Amino acid sequence: MTTPSLTPRPGDQLASTSCTTRVVVVRAPADRALVIECGGSPMVAVASGAKPSPPAPGAGTLIGKRYVDASETVELLCTSSGAGALYCDGVEMTLRSAKPLPASDLPLFFWGVGTNPPDPSPVQPPAVESGSPARLQKTAGAPRGSR
């Protein structure tokens, strides 16, 4: 029996027929058909509704991780973990390593090289009452209602 090949497009959702693995195609070449397998069985479009069978032994897939082929022309994002390993054209796909983030230049750019950030200005308490000091002294000890 021949393994079916498909021409996946970015955004296509594929499901394994051997375990619970589901992936979304992130990058794929448009000019050739691919054989994408999981756990030794070909993956199918999610809309086909294929039922998973018992998982084949393998390394397994991890949810949220990206997998690439050897030439890094095919990239899949795992949306549901499973027991099977991913293969593209018979070669096991590898976990894509994270790209290093650039160093933060915000303090140097924002404050300037060799300078400290400015001290925050002290907050002034709001005035309680306005008026002349003589008026405030007269009413300070007087009972409410009499002025």
Image: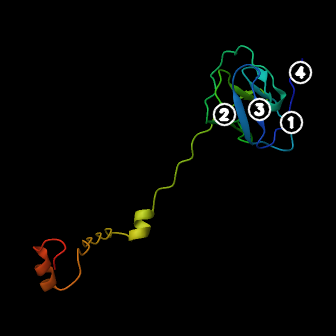
Residue where numbered disc 2 is placed: 78
Indicate which disc residue 2 carries. 4
Indicate which disc residue 14 carries. 3
What whole-number distance in Å separates the C-alpha atoms at marks 1 and 4? Answer: 14 Å
What whole-number distance in Å separates the C-alpha atoms at marks 2 and 4? Answer: 25 Å
Mark 4: amino acid: Thr
Mark 2: amino acid: Cys
Mark 1: amino acid: Ala
Mark 3: amino acid: Leu
Q: Residue furthest top?
A: 54
What whole-number distance in Å separates the C-alpha atoms at marks 1 and 2? Answer: 20 Å
Q: Secondary structure at mark 3?
A: strand
Q: In the shown orientation, is residue 119 left or right of residue 83?
A: left
Q: Residues within 10 Å of mark 2 (few under 14, many from 20)?
A: many
Q: How is the image coloured?
A: rainbow
Q: In the shown orientation, is residue 39 left or right of residue 104?
A: right
